[in-house]
Image: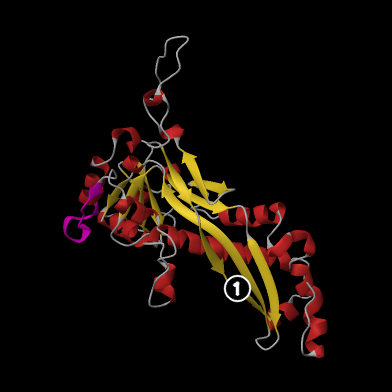
Amino acid sequence: MKITLKSGEEMDDVVALAKSLIGPADLAVGGVLNPKAAARLIQLVFKQEFLSKITTEVLTSLSQEVAALDMARRQMVRVPEGQRPDEGEFASAGVYGCILNVLPIQLFPSVKLSTLRANKDNPQILSMLETSFGDAISRDLVDLGFNGVSDDNVGANREAKFLRLNKGWVQVARDAADTPKVNIDPATDGWIESLTSIVNAADDRARRDSVLIMNEADADDYGRELGVPITGVAMRAESPLRRFEGRPIEAIGDMPRGKVLFTPLKNLVHGIHTEVKRDKAYDGRARALEYTFDMAVDYEIAVKRYTVLAE
């Protein structure tokens, strides 16, 4: 873990701090975070406002089944005493559940020498950096969760490749045969008519618990359509402008414009593997402490028929 700089002048400023940012106690073999340190980072990620509302799974393998029996209906049966239930009488995780297949992703943040110097005597620097990295990871994970279109990592530029790191919930719903699809044209029909058609398409068993997940700008347009003045106070989640016929509207900036998901929030699943790799190295020429985070994630919808996709 020793960091050697070419410039002796810089060494006194950063070595003590840099060595403490990831201590040996945090690491297992090969730069893998020990369970406590990995859990701390994962907890920071899952504290993100939206991720804390959905189903978040921490996986110990690259593929794991996620049961959603809490959303299942009419699963109870009667089996005579002395007989075993047959296959059709078991609660079906195939219908009420999904399989997460996590794929690797990386983040390469850097801390400039000026930042290290400014904080060399700051005992909170480690906590600050952990929070900052956790925020950066969670922002990208939410963005990918709504906008990811594929998992082939092929693209003409960095942004295009980002959108193809993994399929997000919109794409999963688009690909699912038993997810109801609704065509909407809010510019012509208005949001009230569009949202009405979305709610009407929902499975009766999921309608009561479902929320309308919309782009924040689209939710604002709906509020204007109601003819109610929009203010900072009125746009809070409990505002009538953030509800449709009593149903909550989850306004998300990362949700694509012109698209709506109508589903119970817990029906959206996000998984992350417990093994997180974190490496660091000081680049004397770039004058920055460079981190590498390596983890594996996936997105799924537990019960496809309980989600309506409108486009």
Write the start and end of the magenta stretch as one range: 181-192
Quadrant in which the C terminus is drawn: bottom left
Residue 218's x, y, as percent? 31, 59
Furthest-left residue in view? Answer: 188
Name above or below for residue 125 compared with residue 55: below
At label 1, counting other C-alpha atoms closer than 10 Å, the crowd grade (few under 14, some 14-19, many 20 or more) is some
Residue 37's x, y, as percent? 70, 56
Residue at (54, 47) in percent of width and height = 57
Residue that badge 1 annotates: 109
Camera sees residue 47: no
Residue 87's x, y, as percent? 40, 26
Residue 290's x, y, as percent? 65, 76
Q: Nearer the viewer, residue 207 or 187?
A: 207
Camera sees residue 198: yes
Does 91 lie within the magenta span?
no
Residue at (52, 53) in percent of width and height = 49
